[in-house]
Image: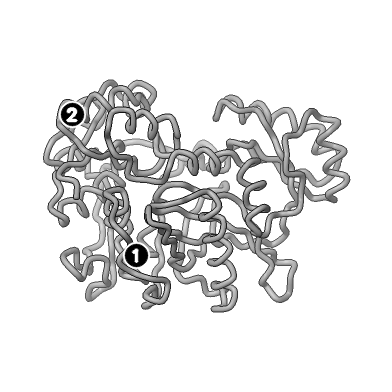
Amino acid sequence: MFKKILIANRGEIACRVIKTARRMGIQTVAVYSDADARAPFVKMADEAVHIGPPPASESYLIADKIIAACKQTGTEAVHPGYGFLSERPSFAEALAAEGIAFIGPPVNAIAAMGDKIESKKLAKEAGVNVVPGFVGEIEDTEHAVRISNEIGYPVMMKASAGGGGKGMRLASDEKDVREGFESVKREGLNSFGDDRVFIEKFILNPRHIEIQILGDKHGNILYLNERECSIQRRHQKVVEEAPSPFVTSKMRKAMGEQCVALSRAVGYYSAGTVELIVSGADLTGESFYFLEMNTRLQVEHPVTEAITGIDLVEQMIRVAAGEKLAMTQDDVKIDGWAIENRVYAEDPYRGSLPSTGRLSRYRPPVEGWTDDGAENGRRGVDGVRVDDGVYEGG
């Protein structure tokens, strides 16, 4: 097992990883920018290394600075958290070149699933249901119109490297395609450095269901049930629930087995999430399709931990250290119900745009949650868990 790990992230997820590492007896190293010098995660870590000015492009996104911090502190492994460098194959490769373990999936899996066009091809080959559409790169506007007409409206145009609600445009007719195709290309290029676009059928009255995957380096892959993420705002999840009140045991098994098949196809290990969309047009409610795979820990992972009692961060660390999973699929249970609510600010004077600023008052609820030994991840008396990385006045 590792003696020291570095968390290449900030805020809530850095605090989350530090808590588990501390319980496992592993020393932690935080990296921070000027803006985070007084942040809770910096104080929680055993060591902290300054890596630059506030802009992420000059600090948290610079792989060389992260690696330098690893060398400076004698770090054996890096947990990337989510966002920033967590899904960049080049970062995992750079760590490997320096003999530093990446607490996450293999490079080839990150690369394959990070390309939405290629991931859909792989999913189809693995026998996973995919949304009807054109699995390939759209050449130009005329090609987009032709493909959209063949699929049948409405359709969704998506940037191949898109995510987080960016690089998406709904088209109800040919006019929408002609007006929106180039803007999707531009947004893909500006936000993700990739202007490739694909088109698929827009699923009416959709439900967003995702399956939590966990695998080791010895060929064992499990699905840890599902999360319901249908309540969204601006294509961003707001409320997540596990288990889904909509998914039957038969449907859960079918979804889980397809997601495991996809994971095997790319040699996956560590924690990952396969996102699916369920058609509301199907009265049986059991028509589900592959959307994408996130090759990292999700913000909403706590609801899965709550109903399974499995600490996903701990499992990621153990897998990265070469350990086999200590559980089988039959050991994965559903114990209770969990709901996660994300708290975020909007500016009502600017059309309710997402807003950042100083927290003048912050009073989180008192946790009713144990965080030690075998009881880690289990519900406490009040069943309340708080995952945060902020403080009043910050």
Q: How far across and how far down the image is residue 391, in percent? A: 22, 44
Find numbered disc 1 in the image and state the secondary structure of the residue it sits on.
helix
Say which quarter of the image contains residue 289.
bottom right
Q: How far across and how far down the image is residue 215, in percent? A: 41, 57
Task: Please name the amino acid that badge 1 sits on.
Answer: Glu
Task: Please name the amino acid that badge 2 sits on.
Answer: Val
Q: How far across and how far down the image is residue 308, in percent? A: 35, 70
Residue depicted at x 28% and y 39%: 78
Q: Is residue 244 above or below residue 44?
A: below
Residue to which mark 1 is pinned: 305
Q: Is residue 222 left or right of residue 147?
A: left
Find numbered disc 2 in the image and state the secondary structure of the residue it sits on.
strand
Q: Is residue 279 above or below residue 191?
A: below
Label drawn at residue 275: none
Residue to which mark 2 is pinned: 49
Front position in the image: 236 or 393: 236
Q: Is residue 299 visible?
A: no
> What whole-number distance in Å separates the C-alpha atoms at marks 2 and 1?
30 Å
Residue depicted at x 67% and y 40%: 158
